[in-house]
Structures are given as structure tokens and as C-alpha cells.
Amino acid sequence: GDLAKATLALKGGRVSGTIQFVPYASSAQAFLVEATEGGRAALALVERDAAVKVKADANVDGSSACEVTFDAATARVLVQDEAACTMAGQVRQLLALGAAIELVGVSSTALDMTLEYIKVRQQFGKPLGSFQALQHRAAHLYSELEVARAAVLKAQQLLDAGDAGADQAVSVAKAMTGLGQPECDDGFVCLVDGAGAGAARPASDFAWPAPDRARPEARAGHEAHPRRRLRGPARRRL
């Protein structure tokens, strides 16, 4: 499984190595890590102590990620071998689905704020929402959001039911929300005619994250990863 490529080494109940681009590591009290010991895959829990070093780095979008170094840190092995690979896969599924759910929430909030704004903002003596071009853009964003929401709900249903198609459904949900959320953010900035796009205004919370606030689609691994697993119509631009 993927754990065979783990960069952390486990020996005698201690783990060593470095992991990069870990969100929220600065506030974490423990880490669930993938490691190998003598060629055997393992999933272990490492409590944060002096043997765990966390270095925060700034990302280009203003958010932050961390480099976590384990220097013979004490680790409690939870599972090994195939069971470790299975559990790691389940954790990745939940992380991807959680990120997709959050993306739907972020997009939904951005769209609600946009619709409220264009109802009251006046231009040429009329509300912005009365102009057909902006109505079409808002309707398009709504349809994008609802398609993504449906994909997330389907993934949740299949995962809860233990369906064999849950893994692909989660990938579809993550890919669709990863594509749709930036478009909703861009539409938000466009439809509010640039108002609120500064660092201290609401639009910046969606389009350009503040420091220490990671962009949602980056939180559970690279946003492109689920798309690489898909083939056919599911890969089209939404």
C-alpha cells in the first residue's frame, strides 16, 4: 500500500524523520503518522514532546503550513501491515470528505453574501441584481454549488453504507468541490464589484486566506489528487 512509501522510520517504539506541509501542526498535541519498520507498514500515534520539532512556513497565498521533525520520538504503534494500510486509507477518505464538506460550506457562505450584496448595491439607479448579466453569473454559481453539494451528499451516503463505490464517490466529491469553490470565490469578488476584496474585508476570507488560515482545498492533501484518480465525464470542468 501507500505506507510502503512512508518517509518516517520506526525503530524500537521510536519514530524519526521529517514531514512537510502539515496544516495546523503548531497547535497539535499529537500526530497520527505513517511509518515503516523493517519493511513493515505501521500507523502510530506520537505525542508531542521535546523530540517533536515544529517549524511554521509561510505559503504563497498567505496561509501557513508546518515542517514536523521527529527525532526518535516515542510512538505507540496502533496497527501494522495490511491493517495499517486499510486504516490509513479510511483516514484519507474521511479527511478528503471533510475537506469537501468544508468547501461546500465556504462556497455556500460566499454565495449567500454575494446575493445579499447585489440586492442592495445600487448602480444606475437600480440594484445590481436587476441586471441580467449578473443574474446569469449568480445562477451559474448556484448551479455549480448544488452539483458539488449533491456529490458530497452521495459520498456521505455511500461511505455510511459501507458501499464499495464510496472511495470513488469521495474522490468525485473532493474533485468537484475543489474546482467549484475557487469559482464561487472569484464570482463573489466579481459580483461585489471588488468591494471587500482588501485584506481586511469579507471577500478576502474566501479568495485570499489570512495568515495561519490555510486555504480549504489544501488541507487534506493536494486538491488535484482526487482528480487524477478519475476518468471520463467526472473530470470535466464544472
Image: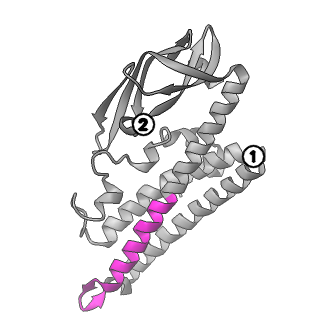
Amino acid type for the residue under numbered disc 2: Ala
Instruction: Name the foreground residue: 158 vs 66.
Output: 66
Residues in magenta?
Answer: 104-127
Q: Nearer the viewer, mark 1 or mark 2?
A: 2
Residue 180's spot in the image, x, y percent?
A: 49, 58
The numbered disc on residue 165 is 1
Location of mark 2 (residue): 28
Q: Is 17 positioned to the left or the right of 150 in the image?
A: left
> Tag 2 or tag 1, which sits nearer the N-term?
2
* Membership of 125 in magenta stretch: yes
Instruction: Name the foreground residue: 91 vs 193.
Output: 91
Please report the residue visible at 42 percent of the width from the left and 63 percent of the height from the top.
184
Amino acid type for the residue under numbered disc 1: Gly
Q: Is 21 positioned to the left or the right of 47 in the image?
A: left
Q: Quadrant of residue 148?
A: bottom right
Q: Quadrant of residue 59?
A: top left
How would you rate the neighbour count of disc 1 (Cα within 10 Å): few for under 14, some for 14-19, many for 20 or more?
A: few
Residue found at the far bottom of this picture: 125
Magenta part mainly helix, strand or loop?
Answer: helix
Residue 163's spot in the image, x, y percent?
A: 78, 47
* Membership of 154 in magenta stretch: no
